[in-house]
Image (tube, rainbow, N blue to C red):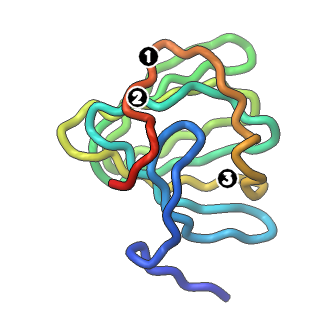
Amino acid sequence: MNTVQLEDAKRGRSPLGAFIRYLQDGPHGTMIHSTVPPGMVGRACHFRSIDEYWFVLSGRGEVWRRARDGAESITELRPGVSVDIPLGTVFQYRCTGGEPLAFICTALPPWPGDEEAVLVDGPWEPKNTAAGTP
C-alpha cells in the first residue's frame, strides 16, 4: 500500500513540457498530477504503448486530438472534464486561462519512460516548454 501527499510528491517534467508530480506507480498503471502554466503550449505527440486518462482539477485549456482514423477534435479543458488519449492518438494541449491548468493523468499500462512519447507536429506552436519549476 502506498500513500502520497501532493506537496511531497517527486517533481519532474513531462516530455511534452508540463510540470508533473509522481503520485502512484504500480504494476498496472501510473498516476501523475500535471500542471500547465498560463500561456504554455505543450509539444504534440503520440504514444508507443499506453493509453492516458485525464481529469481536470483547475484552470482552463484545450486538448487537440487526432484519432488513428483521422478524426480530429479540440476539447475545452475545465474543472470536472475527463478526456482519454487512446493508444495511437496524436494530441497536443495548451493552457488558455490566467491560472495554471491542473489535471490528474493516469497511464495504462505503467509509463515506461520519456521515450514513450513520439514528438510530431501539431496545430499549435509549442511555447514555454523549457525546463524549470513552477
Between 94 and 84, the residue placed more toward the observer is 94
Left or right: where 120 falls relative to 27: left
Residue 12 placed where, x, y %?
A: 52, 57
Q: Residue furthest bottom?
A: 1
| Residue underneath mark 1 | 125
User: Tag 1 or tag 3, which sits nearer the N-term?
Assistant: 3
Local SS, label 3: strand
Q: Write down the quadrant of residue 129 in the picture.
A: top left
**What residue is at 78 percent from the left and 55 percent from the top?**
109
Q: Which mark is residue 107?
A: 3
Left or right: where 78 falls relative to 91: left
Q: Amino acid at mark 2?
A: Val
Q: Write down the quadrant of residue 77 in the picture.
A: top left
Q: Amino acid at mark 1?
A: Glu
Q: Residue furthest left?
A: 98
| Residue underneath mark 2 | 41
Local SS, label 1: loop
Q: Are marks 1 and 2 in contact (CB under 8 Å)?
A: yes
User: Tag 3 or tag 2, which sits nearer the N-term?
Assistant: 2
The crowd level at tag 2 (other Cα within 10 Å; few <14, some 14-19, many 20+) is: many
Q: Nearer the viewer, mark 3 or mark 1?
A: 1
